[in-house]
Amino acid sequence: MLYYLCLSSHGYGHASRQASILSEVYKLRPDWRFIVSSFVDIDFLNLAFWGLPIEHRRIKWDVGMIQSDALQVNNSSTLNSIHNLEKGMSKQISLEAKWINSQNSEVIIISDIPPSAARLAEELGAKLIWIGNFGWDDIYSPIGGEFENYAKSLSKQYSKGDLLLRCPFSMQMDWQIPEKEVGLTYSKPRKLPPQFHQRLDQSLEPLVMIGFGGLGFRFEYDLLDKWPNYNFIMAKPSNSTYISSCPNLIYLPEAVRVIDVLPFCFRLIGKPGYSTFCEAISQEVGLHIVKRDDFAESEFLIRGLKQYAHYKILEKDDLLSGNWQLDENLIEPLDDVIDKDGALAAAKEIIIHAMK
């Protein structure tokens, strides 16, 4: 069986989710062949899917939203990118279907959550499973204007799927197809490099992860001076100009993911994000989340945050001023019971559906 994953090129959260699910599928069906088709940064994909026998196909299946950083979107740039992508989509799908057919194998299409996967599955006559907590129709429709018309066309594509695996913190995804709910999806923490592990163990101050996803968010490093009794961990900026030598800042080694360090952490400061929430809740790490009002998913994520996490909600001004409230008690969740075996449950559903 050829397991063909159409993976969104918007951010890193979709890749993190799918790495956790594909890992469980591989444990149950090591005889399958796994293709990850995406335009996400190849280094991140290799880190997320490390140890799994995946093959890459470098294809951009969707745009998502164009963002200047983790908290700001650009609607006009997004529309332009959508138009440009659509110009070549039919040819791209035709060429990729030809390649898949040349592999002489049964295929199942998994999409998280590019709607164009429906056109690929239709051309192949293959089964299609959606996995996610939103569709791009849910994101685009509230923006209005041309986005609203485009959203209607995407809803039609989503309605052609065979199954929706609905993840926590989900939006409407009202596609009138069979669906199954699954719990939190997250990868298991890996062992840390010995020297880095020792450094964390020897930290006398509470450790706080700063994580704003693949796009990151620039802030002034001297804000860390406001919290001298805490040590902070974050990914090293890609631009060396912004690398800091603050005494209470620790950079993640290149081969280490956020989830690998969370078991050592006291709190996490970040934006609303599906994988961030899954990983932090699974490791019982308190969340300090910066509000954002320009991305429709955020409202549903915040609902989930209040339901299942210990949390603080920060305004953007709080982030920029250093008012991070790390010395305050967290707000208790309304209900701290949530299924944490979503990746395994999703894997089992995929296998059952593929073998029908």
Image (cartoon, rainbow, N blue to C red):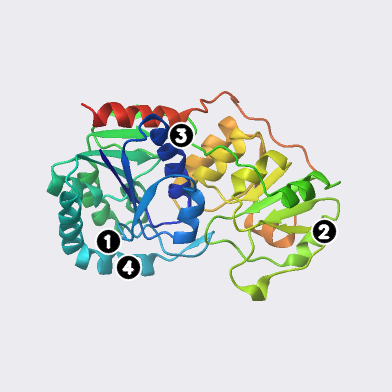
Mark 3 / mark 1, whichever is N-terminal: 1
Labelled disc at residue 81: 4
The secondary element bearing badge 3 is classed as: loop
Discs 4/1, front:
4
The secondary element bearing badge 4 is classed as: helix
- Residue 294 visible in rendering: no
Residue located at (42% from left, 43% from top): 18
Q: Are marks 3 and 1 in contact (CB under 8 Å)?
A: no
Q: Which residue is mark 1?
A: 146
Residue 279, x across and y down, in percent: 57, 40
Mark 1 / mark 2, whichever is N-terminal: 1
Using the numbered discs, state the Cα–Cα distance from disc 4 to disc 3 in whole angstroms.
29 Å
Q: Which residue is mark 2?
A: 226
Q: Which residue is mark 3?
A: 168
Using the numbered discs, state the Cα–Cα distance from disc 1 to disc 2 in whole angstroms.
45 Å
The secondary element bearing badge 1 is classed as: helix
Q: Residue furthest bottom?
A: 241
Mark 2 / mark 4, whichever is N-terminal: 4
Q: Residue furthest front?
A: 31
Using the numbered discs, state the Cα–Cα distance from disc 2 to disc 4 in whole angstroms.
41 Å
Please state if 156 lies on the left or on the right of 56 as rendered: left
Using the numbered discs, state the Cα–Cα distance from disc 3 to disc 1 in whole angstroms.
29 Å
Crowding near pointer 1: few (<14 within 10 Å), some, many (20+)? Answer: few
Residue nearest the observer in this picture, 96 or 164:
96
Going by the numbered disc 1, the residue's amino acid type is: Glu
Please state if 131 lies on the left or on the right of 205 as rendered: left
Discs 3/1, front:
3
Residue located at (15% from left, 50% from top): 101
Q: Are marks 1 and 2 in contact (CB under 8 Å)?
A: no
